[in-house]
Image (spheres, helix red, strand yellow):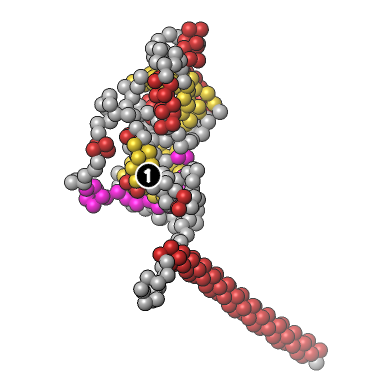
Amino acid sequence: LGAGLAAYCCAGRERAARAALDASRRECAKWRAEKKAERSGRIEAEKELKSLRLRAQASEALLSKDDAAGAGDGGDGEQDQALPQAYTLSPIGFIRTCFSRRSGTPRQPHLVPAARGVVTLKRELPKDILSGLGDYSHCWVIYVFHQNTNLHQDWSKMKGKVNVPRLNGGRVGALATRTPHRPNAIGLSTAKVESVTDKTVLLSGVDLVDGSPILDIKPYVPFCDAIGDASQPEWVTRDREVEEEPLHVSRVSISQEPWNRLRECWQRVGGEASLYEDFGTLVDLVRQVLSRDIRSLHQRGALALTAKTGSANHGKRPLGTGVEGSAANAAATAAATVYHLHLLGRIDISYVHERKEIEVIDATIV
């Protein structure tokens, strides 16, 4: 009797436990269903809110257009369905380049073959998204001119024409140039693909400022991207090496003292661990960057004005003469205008530019 009673009690406890477990499962299933419905409703609400915002922007644009055109234009009042007036794009990654600032960054790709950059994609992107890119020699890079001072400027306040460096300040319509100052600050560039590893791409010949947000990368396909019979204005095709070319530089010299200082700076910023594992390649970068006049139109204009007024501080110092650090050379350096090139985040290279010749005079860490 005792054994039977114990078995009955055990069976009862088991039934109660199973009932409690079933009830818990039902509660969990109900909770999951509620959460799923809540999440689905929230997503749908966010989509609807986004749609409403886009429709509101489109309506505002149409109203502004109608106000500008004036009433009573003879139309029938019907309007086409409005398209979205704004699209949201998120960077897929960022690029680390040797150019710390806008000043000194090449105005076009491939002008400085030694210019390197590493694109690192965001972690949430698929791991195989770059698979196959290494089979191409070059790629297109679409990015944001994030250092533009007029990045969020009202279009109604922007200038239609911009000063072109190769025209010595001559003005051309912004959309007929490669200027960064555009209605949408989006850049399009080509680069040489050096290597592809996981979610990083090593590029060369870049003309991007360090930290530029990357919107997209596409392979460069010669058979459809290279247009053999394309035409362009005369000022674009002008020989870059001729003396009359506004950006022409005939010589870049680096004497022993600034050479040694540059090596010290390179070692302090990481040496082999930087974008330039070989110091000689960094020197090539400096020479290539300075082989074109990187000064702004304002700087070049100020120098021309000074020369026209007969200033004794310009045009009298023979480049490449004397020993850096000597009293005579120091005095000559002080008399000349000193310009700066910033590379690898912390290296400040000082140089003088006279009569289309450049001499590097110092390198420091900033």
Task: Give the quadrant of the N terminus.
Answer: bottom right
| Residue 188: percent from left, percent from top | 36, 47
Task: Give the quadrant of the C terminus.
Answer: top right
Q: Nearer the viewer, residue 275 or 302?
A: 302
The residue at 49%/50% (across/down) is 153
Please check the rendered image and state whether residue 221 is part of the magenta-colored stretch, yes or no.
yes
Q: Residues within 10 Å of mark 1 (few under 14, many from 20)?
A: some
In the displayed structure, 175 sits above or below 301; it is: below
Q: Farthest residue in the front direction?
A: 72
| Residue 328: percent from left, percent from top | 48, 7
Q: Which amino acid does the dot numbered 1 rest on?
A: Lys
Q: Farthest residue in the left direction?
A: 229
Q: Farthest residue in the bottom direction?
A: 1
Please check the rendered image and state whether residue 306 is part of the magenta-colored stretch, yes or no.
no
In the displayed structure, 341 sits above or below 355; it is: below
> Does the image show residue 202?
no
Q: Secondary structure at mark 1?
A: strand
The residue at 46%/57% (across/down) is 89
| Residue 60: percent from left, percent from top | 48, 66
The residue at 41%/55% (across/down) is 128
> Does the image show residue 207?
yes
| Residue 348: percent from left, percent from top | 50, 27
- Magenta stretch bounds: 209-227
Q: Which residue is identified by label 1?
A: 161
Q: Nearer the viewer, residue 186 or 65?
A: 65
